[in-house]
Amino acid sequence: MELNPSYTEALLSLSITLNDMGRYEEAKTVYRRASETVEVAGASTPGGIFRGRIANLHAELGELYLALGRNEDAILEYRKALAAAPEYPDLRVRMVVALREAGRMAEGLEETEKVLAGHPGNIPARIQQGILCYLSGDKASARRAWEDALFRDPTNKLVQLYLNMLDRESTGK
C-alpha cells in the first residue's frame, strides 16, 4: 500500500485482517479508505471496479514475459496495465524495469520522472532512476538518486549496496 495507496484489494485485505485481530476502529478506517479509493477511481462507471484487476492481470503477464526475456512483450503488457490504471505507480516502475532490460534507458528515465512527479517518496522508482543513470554513465545523478532513496529509507540494503559500489569505483578498489 505504500507503493500504491489506491490498491483497493490490499486495503480490503488489511481491513479484514485488522477486524480479525479485534482492531475494529482501525479496520473501519481502512475500509472507509478503500471505499473512497473505489469512488475516486470510478467504480461507479460500468466496469470501473474491474480496472485494477485488469491492470494487475496485464502486469502479471508482463512479469512472465520479463522473466522469459521477452522485454518488448513485457513493455506492451505494462502499457496495457497503465492504460487501465494510470494512477498505479508500481505498474509504471515495473515498466521501467522492462524498458531498462530492453536497453531503452531514456524512456525508462522519462517514466521514472512521471512516477516521481506524483510520488517523490517512491523508493523503487528512485532506485530505478539511479540504475538508469548509472547505466547511462551519469554516476553523479545515480548517486543523487540513491542518496535520496537512502535518506527516505535509511535501512534499505539495496541502496546501500549501490552506493558502496559507487564508492569502491571512485577509490579504484
Image: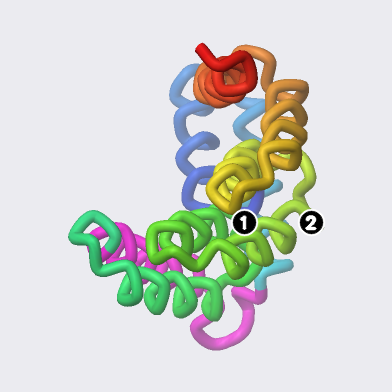
* Residue under the image location 64 percent in, 64 percent down: 111
Dot 1: few (<14), some (14–19), or many (≥20) neighbours within 10 Å?
A: many
- Whether residue 23 is visible to the viewer of this picture, yes or no, is no
Q: Which kind of residue does numbered mark 1 sit on?
A: Pro
User: Mark 2 — residue?
Assistant: 118
Q: Position of residue 102 (x, y in %)?
A: 39, 65
Q: Pick whichever, 2 or 149, lies toward us.
A: 149
Q: Position of residue 124 (x, y in %)?
A: 58, 41
* Residue 99 within the segment the image draws in magenta: no
User: What's drawn in magenta, residue-wise?
Assistant: 42-65
Q: Is residue 56 left or right of residue 156?
A: left
* Residue 53 within the segment the image draws in magenta: yes
Q: Residue furthest front?
A: 172
Q: Pick whichever, 6 or 146, lies toward us.
A: 146
Measured along the vertical axis of the image, is residue 70 above or below residue 133? below
Give residue 24's quadrant in the image: top right
Measured along the vertical axis of the image, is residue 29 above or below residue 87? above
Q: CA distance from mark 2 to mark 1?
A: 9 Å
* Residue under the image location 49 percent in, 83 percent down: 47
- Whether residue 107 is visible to the viewer of this picture, yes or no, is yes
Q: Secondary structure at mark 1?
A: helix
Q: Are marks 2 and 1 in contact (CB under 8 Å)?
A: yes
Q: Secondary structure at mark 2?
A: helix
User: Mark 1 — residue?
Assistant: 89
Q: Position of residue 108 (x, y in %)?
A: 58, 62
Q: Is residue 164 left or right of residue 100?
A: right
Q: Which kind of residue does numbered mark 2 sit on?
A: Gly
Give residue 77's quadrant in the image: bottom left
Q: Residue furthest bottom?
A: 46
